Image (cartoon, grey):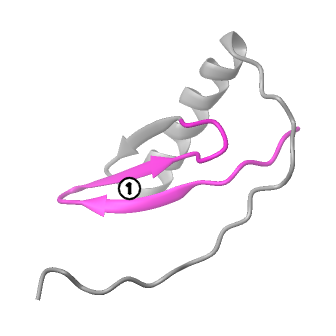
Amino acid sequence: MVQLNAILTKEEDMYIAKCPEVGTISQGHTIEEALENLKEATELYLEEFPLKIGGRLLLTTFEIQNACS
């Protein structure tokens, strides 16, 4: 069993789910649906391209000047 991360955003009426370790992306009308679709897409992807286990992903934040003022 491998634990991966998911980043979710909402765009109009859909949730977009991304797995940063693998690069897979999926969507759904609910968070649960988007995650389930991402899980399926990631499992299918990894059947063809096995995951090379490396260091843990480090998630952080940073700030920029708002250029859209």
Image location of residue 61, percent across then percent down? 56, 78
Please name the residue shown 51% across and 80% down the image.
62
Lateral position of residue 9 relative to residue 5, left or right: left
Please name the residue shown 30% across and 87% down the image.
65
Residue 15 covered by magenta stretch: yes
Is 53 located above or below residue 20 in the figure? Answer: above
Q: Amino acid at mark 1?
A: Thr
Q: Nearer the viewer, residue 6 or 67?
A: 67
SS category of the residue bearing label 1: loop
Screen quadrant of the N terminus: top right
Quarter of the rendering containing residue 69 = bottom left
Quarter of the rendering containing residue 12 = bottom left
Quarter of the rendering containing residue 64 = bottom left
Residue 3 covered by magenta stretch: yes
Lateral position of residue 17 relative to residue 4, left or right: left
- Counting labels gives 1
Image location of residue 17, percent across then percent down? 46, 49
Lateral position of residue 11 relative to residue 35, left or right: left
What segment carries the magenta color?
1-23
Is 68 located above or below residue 19 in the figure? Answer: below
Q: Nearer the viewer, residue 10 or 54?
A: 54
Please name the residue shown 61% across and 19% down the image.
44
Lateral position of residue 4 relative to residue 16, left or right: right
Image location of residue 7, percent across then percent down? 52, 58
Is 11 located above or below residue 18 in the figure? Answer: below
Please name the residue shown 60% across and 37% down the image.
39
Q: Nearer the viewer, residue 10 or 59?
A: 59
Residue on which the image places disc 1: 30
